[in-house]
Amino acid sequence: MTKVNSRFTSLFVTIFVIIFMYLPIVMLVTMSFNASRYGGKWTGFSLKWYETLFRDHSVINATMNTLFVALMATIFSTIIGTLAAWVLNAYKNSNVQRLHYGLIYAPLVVPDVLMGISLLLMFVSLKVDLGLTTVILAHITFCVSYVAFTVLARLQDFDFALIQAAQDLGAGSFRIFIKIILPLLLPGIIAGAMMAFTLSMDDFVVTFFVGGPGSTTLPVKVYSMMKHGPPAIINALSVVFMAVTFTVAIIGNVLLRKKSSPSRAVAQH
């Protein structure tokens, strides 16, 4: 009887959590197809809000800004984060590396409001004009940490004996990097890049502080539309934005779980 009650309780809690987490998303998607402007009640299926959304030039400009910032932040944070992860793993027994771990880990625990204010004060102190450049620099700041720890997790399963074997066989540093290191780390690097891209696209707080004229991104645009725009258009914009970020996040998780076989790499190279 106790086992039955335990299973029933677990099932009830699971269903409650799923409903609590995903019912608002289901309602958002449903209301984006509602013909009613304010979504008070269902008045019929319609795609007119998506048509209105895709004809809104301000939304298109915000989308272009978001994609540009996310792309730039992803490229630079992936390069810096991968190099940081490699160095942290190579010298992990050094006492100095504990400080480096703390510096990399800090952006993960510092509140977004504090990071946004800190970066804003820094840019103002350096007399840097706020715009897309400051937004990109700010996004790189917090994306580097996520990339570094994602690649570090991949390095935990890395067999460094493969590098020694390749060196014994006469392979140069460039060939070792192209044929061994990069293929084995690539799933982790791509997963980190996907995570950085998703975080950059979703960020609102930091962007709100460090953004300037002409640097409005989609999250900031949604915030402004909540005050002035019709709710139905916001629903449609949120669904499109959510679909893009969910897709990137799912791809990143799949790549992160992908395991490459060291023996297969040795056989191929």
Image: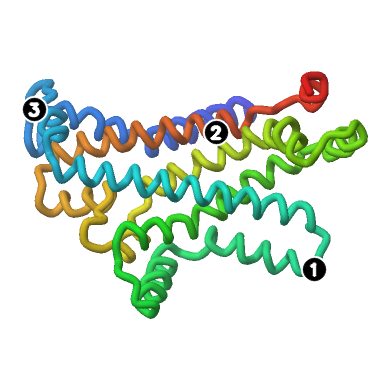
Type of residue at label 3?
A: Ala
Dot 1 alpha-carbon crowd within 10 angstroms: few under 14, some 14 to 19, many 20 or more = few
The residue drawn where x is 44% and y is 30% is 15
Q: Point out the frontmost of discs 1 and 2.
A: 1
Q: According to the image, label 2 marks what residue?
A: 253
Q: Position of residue 35 (x, y in %)?
A: 8, 27
The residue drawn where x is 41% and y is 69% is 119
Q: According to the image, label 1 marks what residue?
A: 95
The answer for how far apart the CA atoms under marks 3 and 1 are is 62 Å
Does the residue at mark 1 contact the one at mark 2 (Cβ under 8 Å)?
Answer: no
The residue drawn where x is 7% and y is 31% is 36
Q: Earlier in the sequence, mark 1 or mark 2?
A: 1
Type of residue at label 1?
A: Asn
The answer for how far apart the CA atoms under marks 3 and 2 are is 36 Å
Q: From this viewpoint, is residue 24 visible?
A: no
Q: According to the image, label 3 marks what residue?
A: 35
Q: Nearer the viewer, residue 63 or 30?
A: 63
Q: Nearer the viewer, residue 1 or 104?
A: 104
Assign a secondary structure to mark 3.
Answer: loop
Dot 3 alpha-carbon crowd within 10 angstroms: few under 14, some 14 to 19, many 20 or more = some
Does the residue at mark 3 contact the one at mark 1 (Cβ under 8 Å)?
Answer: no
Residue 160 vertical placement versus 138 (above, below): above
Q: From this viewpoint, is residue 214 visible?
A: yes
Answer left or right for 37 relative to 155.
left
**Marking on residue 172:** none
